[in-house]
Amino acid sequence: MAFDTMIFLSYTLPADALARGYEPWLREVDNPFFNAVPGMGRYENWRNVTQDPADLPFEHFDFLHPATAEDLERVWFDADLDAFRKGWIRKWGYGATGMTPNRATTHGWLATRLSAPAPVRQDWCVIAGDAPEEAGGERWRIVEALRKHYAIGFAPPGEPWRAPLQPGQGPGFVEFSIHYVEDEIAARALADRLASIPLVIATLMAAPSKPPQL
């Protein structure tokens, strides 16, 4: 199935996370847990291999797809998932900022799909931020910021948990295209052709074993 809604989750891990077994833990614990949450459509974990500019405010990201747009709130506030995410923060933290999220980590970035879905997902992708439509790919636009209540606390009374994206918020781009490719060589060749900034080349760390049916 194709998904029309995505929460783009951007973050950076501590420098020693991979040495401490982060990737096996993702595959064995984190990714299966997220994908079993009621209302979850598909959840994937990715790691930046190249990013331009170098100070793009995240080094890892997740694609979180609720099964439908109506499942968004159900997934975001799932009590078991909240407890799991708080445990993730205690175990892994936020890189150089320790337990305090940086500006790309305080919220999830709710995006809507602007194009036809990619015909296939593969183990590498190139994200072209704010690229022109003719650059192709599966195109998305970030439309709202979702407060990460499990990281920074619930919104004060009268303030919404989701709000239109404000200037300076987000992962460093608003509209972006995702191009799936089979390997790093193809990813780098495509990145050279796109010549887009900001740009990310990423490799898949964990995903459900069965790909979605489009």
Image (cartoon, rainbow, N blue to C red):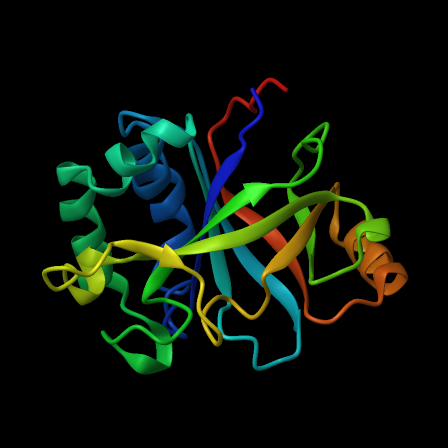
Q: Residue furthest left?
A: 157
Report the front residue among 67 and 81: 67
Report the front residue among 210 and 70: 70
Give the image location of residue 106, x and y in percent: 32, 67
Judge whether 186 appears above or below 13 on screen: above
Give the image location of residue 53, x and y in percent: 66, 79
Q: Is residue 34 left or right of residue 126?
A: left
Q: Quadrant of the N terminus?
A: top right
Give the image location of residue 178, x and y in percent: 68, 48
Q: Is residue 121 left or right of residue 209?
A: right
Q: Is residue 93 left or right of residue 84?
A: right
**Image quarter for residue 160?**
bottom left
Judge whether 97 appears above or below 89 on screen: below
Q: Residue at x 80, y 58 (%)?
A: 132
**Image quarter for residue 144?**
bottom left
Report the front residue among 124 and 161: 161
Judge whether 128 appears above or below 24 on screen: below
Q: Residue at x 84, y 67 (%)?
A: 195
